[in-house]
Structure formats: C-alpha cells, structure tokens
Image (spheres, rainbow, N blue to C red):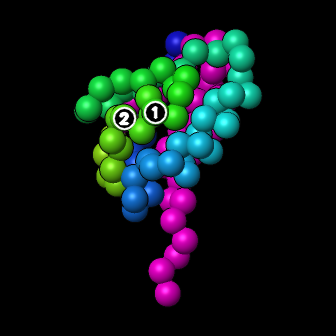
Amino acid sequence: MVEKIVTIKNHAGIHCRPSSVILEAVGKYKDVSFKVIAPNGESDLSSILGLLSLGLHCDDKATLQISGDKEEEIIEEIASLFEYEFDFPQD
C-alpha cells in the first residue's frame, strides 16, 4: 500500500464534474484498492456519492491510499486529478 497527501486546488472543491473524472480514472484499475481519508470521513472511491460526501473544498488536504499492482504509478495519476484545477480561467 502507498499513501500520498493531496491538496485540493479546484476553486469549487471536488464537486460532481471532478468526481466523475476521478472515478472514471479509478475505474480503469480493476485489481487495485482505492481509499481517500479526509477530515470529514473516508471513502473507498467506489461511488460518486461516497466521494462527494467527503465535502472536499479548495485547500483541503486528503490522504490517498492505494493497494495493488503498479500502485506507485497509479497514485501519481489519481493524486494529480485531486490536485487539478478543473475550473475555467476567469477573464
């Protein structure tokens, strides 16, 4: 198992759109276990509602835990999605 602490950078936090992108990426890995631990609870990333229920806002920190094949590579990919700024630039 590997762990990585991520900081949410999206201005609106992890809402529906980022959650769906994250879960789509997680869904590619069938033999890998995913878990997110946040100040408001934890989720195993098996459903969008589980992720949304964590209420992750901009600048919140969460810990990703991943177990399985190629976990070092996979954690970097998933962590980058948690830290990605999905919002469009403001003019």
Q: Residues within 10 Å of mark 2 (few under 14, many from 20)?
A: some
Residue at 52%, 76% in the rendered image: 89
> Relative to 83, is 91 above or below?
below
Tell me the kind of residue under disc 1.
Leu
State the residue position of label 1. 49
Whether residue 65 is visible to the viewer of this picture, yes or no, is no
Residue at 50%, 48% in the rendered image: 16
x, y percentage for residue 6? Answer: 42, 40
Whether residue 17 is visible to the viewer of this picture, yes or no, is yes
Residue at 33%, 41% in the rendered image: 55
Q: Nearer the viewer, residue 19 or 77?
A: 19
Q: Is 49 displayed left or right of 73 in the figure?
A: left
Tell me how far mark 1 sits from mark 2, CA to CA: 6 Å
Q: Which residues are magenta?
A: 62-91
Q: Residues within 10 Å of mark 1 (few under 14, many from 20)?
A: few
Q: Tag 1's secondary structure?
A: helix
Q: Is 68 displayed left or right of 91 in the figure?
A: right
> Relative to 68, is 4 above or below?
below
x, y percentage for residue 2? Answer: 51, 19
Q: Tag 2's secondary structure?
A: loop
Q: Is residue 24 magenta?
A: no
For this orientation, the residue located farthest to the left is 39
Residue at 67%, 36% in the rendered image: 25
Tell me the kind of residue under disc 2.
Ser
**Mark 1–mark 2 contact, CB under 8 Å?**
yes
State the residue position of label 2. 53
| Quadrant hosting residue 23 | top right
